[in-house]
Amino acid sequence: MNIKGHVKSLQTYYSKINENLPKKVKNEIKVNNAAIWVYKYLELYKNGHPKISISNIPDFGLTNLPFKGLNVDIYNYENKDLEKKEAIKSGYRKYNQNTDYFILLKPNVDRYYFSKVLDDSSVLIDQKNLIQDLYVYNYDSKGRIKEELQYVLNPSDTIPLKKYNPKYFDVKILFFYNDKDQVISQKIVSGPENEEQIKSHSFDALNTEYEFCSDLQLKYKYDNQGRMAQALLYGDGKTISKEDYIYHATKDYVEKVKFYVSGAGEISNPTKNFVKTYNEQGDMIEKEFILDFPEQTLDVKKLYYTYEYDNHNNWIKCNMFLEGTPDGEPTLVAERKIEYYN
């Protein structure tokens, strides 16, 4: 989300759209505008972990939010687990645009969500559900993470389970290092089937997902300053998805990211290859689609974004130019209401 400071809550909404556009086009750009936010509402604990999220497209104008219903997630953490994992620090510096799976140890979390069900009187009501995500780490002789085991539990009620069978993990990630103790690859392994747990049949990474296979892995490269230069998802003998990071020549931030996305993630963009350019605050200012083949035609090849910021360097207004030119009236305008902890 690229938010700075002690943010308590953040609500994203649309405030303006180009009324000269056809209705069909307006409906499409509200959903598919290459925006980088994923929640229309996000509330955080003081430690920065999510507390409540509403993952839906923004509304026009500030609205009273439904905190009980579909698309609402509520997160609870185990304090001891959180403290233990946050105490383990990585020497690697994380940039906002880097995609990786080893910078911070993932905390165990109980995630509550709602679904629509019929009660005894055949009235449609919101039913509260629970999914538990548990992460267990094993270390090598140097104290580095050797493997991460993820368990996904689904209690029949909303009371968290206290016990689980360690044999039935959902996903196992094996870590491999170079002589500089940098993670250079992670082998992704699917766990055994178990009817008492939710079982994933694909792995999500680098803007796509892919079914488990014998050589599924993430690979990483670094520049001579130890910064991540490339992250790559590989499986079935081919590159599934890739990100190349280009840093500013004199200032220490990611200026561009070159993307290649295949598989399920392709539906989000008109081409498999595209480039995002970022400003010094870490926000996307341009997205360029690269033709996959010379005969391919695109109505719009570039999208542009400008911002207004608050005194924490978090944007509070985003002008989106989605018609191929950075001039004139914005196609769509988004705003954010941000509340901070004192």
Image: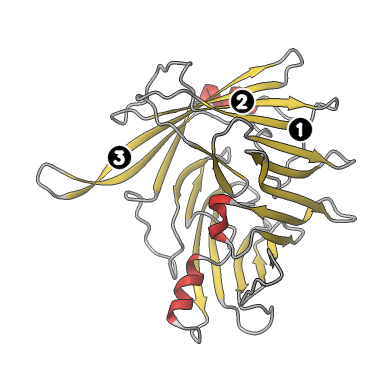
Mark 2 or 1, nearer chain start: 2
Mark 1 or 3, nearer chain start: 3
- Say left or right for 264 vs 328: left
Q: Which mark is residue 128?
A: 3
Q: Please identify the quarter of the rendering in which residue 156 is found.
A: top left
Of the two numbered discs 2 and 1 in the rendering, the one whose residue sits closer to the viewer: 1
User: Vertical placement of 118 versus 197: above or below?
Assistant: below
Q: Please identify the quarter of the rendering in which residue 188 is found.
A: top right
Cα–Cα gap, marks 2 and 1: 22 Å
Q: Are marks 2 and 1 in contact (CB under 8 Å)?
A: no
Could you tell me which residue is drawn at 61 percent across and 25 percent down? Answer: 85
Cα–Cα gap, marks 1 and 3: 41 Å
Residue 134 position, x and y percent, is: 49, 26
Q: Amino acid at mark 2?
A: Lys
Q: Amino acid at mark 1?
A: Ile
Colouring chosen for the image of the structure: secondary structure
Q: Which residue is mark 2?
A: 85
Q: Which residue is mark 1?
A: 184
Question: Does residue 188 show up?
Answer: yes
**Residue at disc 1, secondary structure:** strand
Residue 9 position, x and y percent, is: 51, 51
Residue 158 position, x and y percent, is: 31, 31
- Say left or right for 323 vs 140: left
| Residue found at the far top of this picture | 141
Q: Amino acid at mark 3?
A: Lys
Q: Residues within 10 Å of mark 1 (few under 14, many from 20)?
A: some
Could you tell me which residue is drawn at 47 percent across and 36 percent down? Answer: 201
